[in-house]
Amino acid sequence: MAGSLSLAEIEQRAAARGLLLRLQVKQVLAVRTLRVVVARPRQGQAPVLLGELKGWALPLPHGLQLDTMRVQGADTQGVGALIWAATFAWALEATPCRRARLLAIRDNDQQHRRLVRYFRQLGFEPTREVGAAALDLPLRLVWGGAGLLMSGDIAQGLERVSRRL
């Protein structure tokens, strides 16, 4: 993790941009759920949500499972990078997880290709297709659909996304 940003440094970079970066972590037995949020504060009002990522971590080297990533609204430049960096830094600092998995959902072909390209830029590589086969049913239930299951090295992902910050 030499040369990579810490979670505290990532939070400072968000604050320097006038953004709030918050992690919500809950633990039930050995499973930690994670929600990473980036928002823009407003005077006298609730902050405006700009992006979030949800996932969960099992206490295993391959235990980080990333589910929902969303960036929305105007002026969201760099929000995705902050979310990914915070997620990866948290996993390295607070869990034994060193690899993460996610599903590039296959809603439509064009969107799917964009997701796969985006996730590859973060260091994720395809591991298998999740489709309609009976053996895929458990994965479809976990991930909520069909698509390309991808896996990536968390430290490498942090290093790659840190360059964008």
Image (cartoon, rainbow, N blue to C red):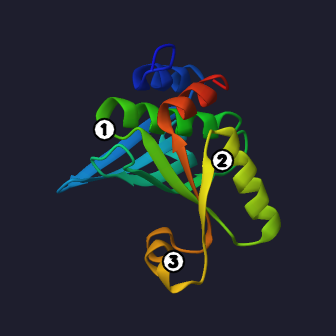
The residue sitting at the right extreme is 110
Query: Quadrant of residue 131 in the image?
Result: bottom right
Kind of element beneath mark 2? helix
Kind of element beneath mark 1? loop
Image quadrant occupied by the C terminus: top right
Report which residue position mark 1 lands on.
96
The residue sitting at the left extreme is 29
Kindly report which numbered mark, 1 or 3, lies closer to the viewer in this rendering: 3
* Residue at the image point whose x is 30% and y is 52% from the top: 58
Report which residue position mark 3 lands on.
136
Q: Amino acid at mark 1?
A: Pro
Image quadrant occupied by the N terminus: top left
Q: Amino acid at mark 3?
A: Asp
Q: Position of residue 164 (x, y in %)?
A: 67, 26
* Residue at the image point whose x is 56% and y is 19% from the top: 16
* Residue at the image point whose x is 51% and y is 24% from the top: 15
Tell me: 114 left or right of 8.
Answer: right
Kind of element beneath mark 3? helix
Mark 2 closeness class: few <14, some 14–19, many ≥20 residues within 10 Å:
many
Examine the rendered structure and indicate whether residue 145 appears above or below residue 90. below
Among the two numbered marks 1 and 3 on one chain, the one whose residue lies closer to the N terminus: 1
Tell me: 79 left or right of 111.
Answer: left
Among the two numbered marks 2 and 1 on one chain, the one whose residue lies closer to the N terminus: 1
Report which residue position mark 2 lands on.
119
Query: Quadrant of residue 105 in the image?
Result: bottom right
Kindly report which numbered mark, 3 or 2, lies closer to the viewer in this rendering: 3
Q: Position of residue 24 (x, y in %)?
A: 35, 45
What count of labels does the image hold? 3
Q: Position of residue 67 (x, y in %)?
A: 50, 58
Examine the rendered structure and indicate whether residue 104 appears above or below residue 53. below
